Amino acid sequence: MIEQQELFVKMATGAWDTYVKRTTALLQKLSNEALSAPTAPGRNTGTYILGHLIAVSDGMLPLFGFGDKLYPHLEHIFLANPENAGLEKPSLNELREQWAQINSKLKTTMDALTPQEWFSRHNAVSAEDFAKEPIRNKLNLLINRTNHLSYHLGQMIFLS
Amino acid sequence: MIEQQELFVKMATGAWDTYVKRTTALLQKLSNEALSAPTAPGRNTGTYILGHLIAVSDGMLPLFGFGDKLYPHLEHIFLANPENAGLEKPSLNELREQWAQINSKLKTTMDALTPQEWFSRHNAVSAEDFAKEPIRNKLNLLINRTNHLSYHLGQMIFLS
């Protein structure tokens, strides 16, 4: 059964890796000019979505118990406020670098988790609530984050 | 350990249910007129994406061993050809009904699968290949299909 646990971890982390790779491939294809355009008239730019994805991935570090965020200042710009709040954004070159860094950091730390650790609670749920709802584990968070990533990739593809 | 197997299934099917619900809620909010517009200039209409999602979900029936497709004629229009091929599409009222039907059928049949069956091969992989790659199971297919659905939901939201 340990084998099956490992298999399930491989399924969920494999899906995450796939969508990170697809997003990275799209980013490499897009110039900074293309990326800074709205994904559709009146909708978020590629820049905002990229910053938003970095901020969400960065938030996974403390949720997974991997330490502090690398880029805590992104939360205010890309999570707490919508793009039309008009806040100044980091340059696309900085964001591209941060996208690479956060994914590399997540990959290294996620690769070191045992299946048992994947099925332990993430830090947004209390030990008490987790006892009642064991579904609120780290791996389930990753499954949700993968769907969030693919949702926004579907939008960024409109820039290509 | 049966318990943990059940937990995996609950995680993956729960994510699927969530995105089906979100998509259904968006469809209910959108008029036929709104849905028939392009999601962005020069991109697929909501009609095409809805037909595409129905066709993909319909394809899960034979892949899961649940019997034949309900709407095999959708494959030619929404999978084998892009929207700009200019093929005649079913009406939005028909598509809305088919979306409800295929989800209801999938839900009933998926609810009846045991965890063991979820980890068995889907019908696009041979028994030989599956022995080498047990990751190619039904549950993994569902995880991938959920990401596919959320990808297109991210686009359809532009119609709202």
Image: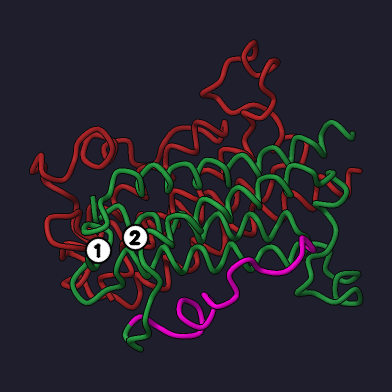
Chain colours: A red, B green
Q: Residue at x 88, y 48 (%)?
A: B116
Q: Read off the chain for label 1.
A: A
Quarter of the rendering occupied by the N terminus of chain B: top right
Residue A37 position, x and y percent, is 15, 65
Tell me the CA gap for discs 2 and 1: 6 Å
Q: Is residue A156 above or below residue B119?
A: below
Question: Residue drawn at (76%, 62%), measured in percent from left and top?
Answer: B64
Given residues B62 and B93, the one toward you in this image is B93
Residue A133 position within the rendered picture, expressed as x and y whole percent measured from the top left: 66, 21
Amino acid residing under circle 2: Glu
The residue at which mark 1 appears reads as A93
Quarter of the rendering containing residue A92: bottom left
The residues colored magenta run B65-83
Indicate the position of residue A43 as horizontal and vertical percent values.
18, 55
User: Please, which residue is most extreme toward the left here?
Assistant: A86
**What amino acid does circle 1 point to?**
Asn
Q: Chain of mark 2?
A: A
Q: Tell whether position B81 is magenta.
A: yes
The disc placed on residue A97 is 2
Task: Please state if A83 lies on the left or on the right of B136 as rendered.
Answer: left
Could you say which is closer to the camera, residue B144 or residue B82?
A: B82
Q: Nearer the viewer, residue B89 or A64?
A: B89
Q: Is residue A80 rendered magenta in the image? A: no
Q: Residue at x 65, y 51 (%)?
A: B105
Tally of marks: 2
Question: Circle 1 — which element?
Answer: helix
The answer to whether the residue labelled 2 contacts the one labelled 1, judged by CB atoms less than 8 Å apart, is yes
Crowding at dot 2, Cα within 10 Å, few <14 / some 14-19 / many 20+, comes out as few
Dominant SS type (magenta):
loop
Q: Residue furthest top?
A: A128
* Residue A75: mark: none
